[in-house]
Image: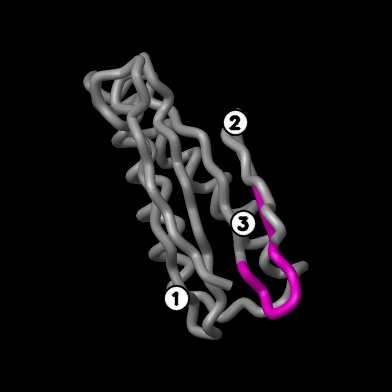
Amino acid sequence: MKLAFSTDKGTRRADNQDYVDVFVNKNGLQLAIVADGVGGQNAGDVAATMAVSHIGNDWETSTLQGVAEVKEWIYAHTQRENELILTAAKRYKTLQGMATTLVLAVVLPNQVVVANLGDSRAYMLRN
């Protein structure tokens, strides 16, 4: 499977609060993450960058292989990242109210595990 990404700020906002990257774990499984900082809120770009960077860096050190353990890992790490973002938002006035959506996809040999939080979505295109 080939992975590629691109973002666009659109026509309504002055800045782009998207952050996206692809990471590979120690077993060669790819994790693609798209975070869309919530527009109109303080520091949506910071929340998006935090989520992608933290989750992605943790993924690179993992040795996961199966669907069940990947699902558990995603759940645990998205919960943890939510807590980190909330803590930072409470600690620093300039970050109050920051938020992001997330879409994650893990590419396994014969399957793809997809998770989304918020109103961002993933689509499967065939042919």
Residue most extreme to the bottom:
27
Q: What residue does disc 3 label?
A: 74
Say how the picture is coloured: one colour
* Residue 20 image point, x, y percent: 39, 50
Q: What residue does disc 2 label?
A: 118
Magenta stretch encompasses residue 113? yes
* Residue 69 image point, x, y percent: 71, 69
Q: Quadrant of residue 98?
A: top left
What residue is drawn where x is 55% and y is 54%?
77
Amino acid at the residue labelled 2: Gly
Instruction: Answer with mark 3 or mark 1, whichever residue precedes in sequence.
Output: 1
Does the CB distance between marks 2 and 3 fall below 8 Å? Answer: no
What residue is drawn where x is 61% and y is 54%?
76
The segment highlighted magenta reads 107-115
Q: Is residue 62 left or right of residue 14?
A: right
Q: What residue does disc 1 label?
A: 61
Of residues 110 and 97, the one drawn nearer to the viewer in this rendering: 110
* Residue 100 image point, x, y percent: 45, 32
Q: Quadrant of the C terminus?
A: bottom right
Q: Secondary structure at mark 1?
A: loop
